[in-house]
Image (cartoon, rainbow, N blue to C red):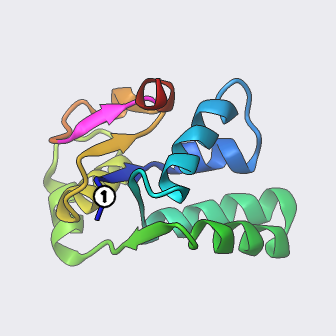
């Protein structure tokens, strides 16, 4: 199995919503996962959040189709009791980012790829911008 990376929701939403100027680097991150250079991981929590945002902006059907495409090459990591407890007790100021971090850590990811680097200052993993990761 290839090196595991955690792909944060913002990276996926950059692609889904074609958010400039971030979409290109985020597409490259997902392409690396799709091509097997890395095993891309997202949390079950991320899937729900991505669906919620995409459904509000483009409707249920488009949201489901996009997520089904993602699930062809991204691995879903469960958010469990231990990870949730660690997130609650952590120094992270953003609770959702704490959840993501401990899910990634529990699945032996080596990095978190996100545009939200500043909120991961207490991370035990490497945290990198998509542009730096593909750079």
Kindly identify which residue carries mark 1: 2
Question: Residue shown at 24%/30% (left/top)?
Answer: 121
Is residue 101 rendered to the left or right of residue 15? left
Question: Residue shown at 25%/54% (left/top)?
Answer: 109
Count of residue discs: 1
Residue 113 placement (x, y as % from top left) = 41, 40
Of 42 and 59, the residue lying toward us: 42
Is residue 115 rendered to the left or right of residue 80? right
Q: Identify the magenta region.
A: 125-129
Is residue 122 rendered to the left or right of residue 62? left
Splitting the image into 4 quarters, where does residue 40 fall?
bottom left
Residue 45 placement (x, y as % from top left) = 45, 67
Of 36 and 119, the residue lying toward us: 36
**104 over 63 or under it: above or below:** above
Residue 122 placement (x, y as % from top left) = 19, 35
Is residue 50 rendered to the left or right of residue 125? right
The answer to whether residue 36 is magenta is no
Question: Residue shown at 34%/55% (left/top)?
Answer: 100
Question: Residue shown at 15%/41% (left/top)?
Answer: 124
Secondary structure at numbered mark 1: loop
* Main SS, magenta residues: strand
Dot 1: few (<14), some (14–19), or many (≥20) neighbours within 10 Å? few
Splitting the image into 4 quarters, where does residue 106 fall?
bottom left
Residue 15 placement (x, y as % from top left) = 68, 45
The answer to whether residue 128 is magenta is yes
**12 over 127 or under it: above or below:** below
Splitting the image into 4 quarters, where does residue 22 fall?
top right
Q: Quadrant of the N terminus?
A: bottom left
């Amino acid at each position: 199995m290839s090196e595991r990376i955690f792909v944060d929701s913002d990276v996926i939403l950059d692609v889904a919503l074609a958010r400039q100027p971030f979409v290109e680097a985020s597409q490259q991150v997902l392409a690396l996962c799709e091509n097997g250079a890395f095993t891309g991981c997202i949390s079950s929590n991320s899937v729900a959040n991505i669906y919620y945002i995409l459904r509000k902006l483009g409707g249920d059907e488009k949201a489901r189709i996009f997520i089904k495409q993602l699930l062809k090459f991204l691995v879903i990591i469960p958010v469990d009791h231990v990870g949730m407890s660690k997130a609650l007790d952590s120094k992270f100021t953003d609770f959702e980012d704490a959840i993501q971090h401990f899910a990634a850590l529990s699945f032996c990811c080596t990095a978190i790829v996100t545009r939200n680097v500043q909120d991961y200052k207490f991370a035990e993993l490497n945290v990198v911008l998509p542009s730096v990761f593909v750079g």
